[in-house]
Amino acid sequence: MDTKKIQCYHCRQRLSIKTNEAKVKCPGCKLLLECSSSPSSYQQQKGFMQICPRGNFGCNIMKKIRNDEISPNKRSLNTKPFSLSSSSSRPSRRAVLCGVSYNKGKFRLKGTINDVRNMRDLLINSFKFQEEGIIVLTEEEKDEMYSPTKKNIQKALEWLVNDCRKGDSLVFYFSGHGLRQPDFNNDETDGFDETICPVDFLKEGMIIDNDINSIIVKPLKEGVTLHAIVDACHSGTILDLEYVYNKYQMTWEDNRPPSGARKATDGGLAICLSACQDNQLASDTSAFTGNTMNGVMTYVLAEIVNKHPGLSYGDLLDLIYERIEEVKKNDCLVNTNFLRRFFKDKLSQKPTLSSSGS
């Protein structure tokens, strides 16, 4: 069968297809591309147009241009949706990815959707996660069950660890606003609880570190590993894990609560990489791509893992520090926190590694 070359209009990936194929799914961005040489009457009625072919790409790619245009940023990232309460068909590699943009308010963020897409691609392409094992919560999902509300985030986290078994590899990712509030339970060495902000946090409240620990850290059974990546301000000890890594002395420091409250797992291992220390702010930048915003820590993490697979946690943290310093020297960081003008002396961002075991 003869083949021909086409190019995806979104990600510019080159594809080889059979000459008689009318449609093809791009393996890069997952868009469904129309590949006929001229638009059909149906396509014309639906608002398709041809993209001018380049060089020897012998096929025009059809693109929908009406108001309901298929935008890659608005396509569902939950390719095989299923009930969060379902315990069936539970893969051993599971992930919950949350990107909160706060579109309806003054706290809006621009890079969180890009962050979630980068993290999802990293898990699928580099760590062999299956699409059906990943739940994505963003405001661009049409189904309300995938909106990053407080209730939905908590439900998704419960799904993540429910009935976890030896050999399971779990991931929790969050990109959005993070805050801190006074600790009245004597559970924090610095006197503050760290929080993440769901899209409805002004109405329903924030999710504090104590609750995150109770939901996804304590239930971890022996042989189960949880990796959390949190790209938010004040996220250093957002999982309340018992040890924090000191990269300068290459030692694990005790972060157990003064009250003696139990923060440990049920035999499993939890590791958290946070965008900054508890008293710092996280940053976004367009320096990496030139035209889209991305969380600095998320983008750098994906970049390094793709380039240097198999790194130790300590080496990974060192490379993240080095890369962020490079970006800072170019004066490209833009802090996402609306209180930036009050914190000019705290804009240094030092990612933090914490663990349930030393």
Image (cartoon, grey):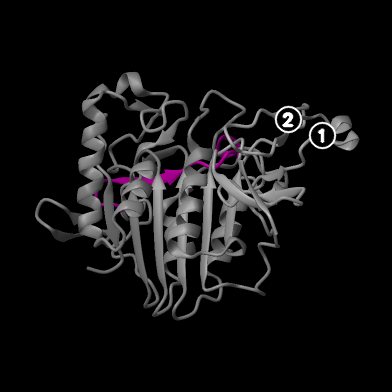
Q: Residue at x 40, y 48 (%)?
A: 230
- The mark total stands at 2
Q: Residue at x 70, y 59 (%)?
A: 1
**What's under tag 1, amino acid-wise?**
Pro
In space, the residues marked 2 and 1 are separated at their CA atoms by: 7 Å
Question: Does the magenta-highlighted stretch encompass residue 191?
Answer: yes
Badge 1 local density, few (<14 within 10 Å), some, or many (20+)? some
Q: Position of residue 33 (x, y in %)?
A: 70, 43
Please report contact status of discs 2 and 1: CB closer than 8 Å, yes or no: yes
Q: Residue at x 78, y 27 (%)?
A: 66
Tell me the SS state at disc 1: loop
Identify residue for label 1.
Answer: 39
The quarter holding residue 323 reads top left
Badge 2 local density, few (<14 within 10 Å), some, or many (20+)? some
- 202 vs 340, nearest the viewer: 340
Q: Earlier in the sequence, mark 2 or mark 1?
A: 1
Span highlighted in magenta in the image? 188-203
Identify residue for label 2.
Answer: 50
Tell me the SS state at disc 2: strand
Judge left or right: residue 17 versus residue 195.
right
**What's under tag 2, amino acid-wise?**
Gln
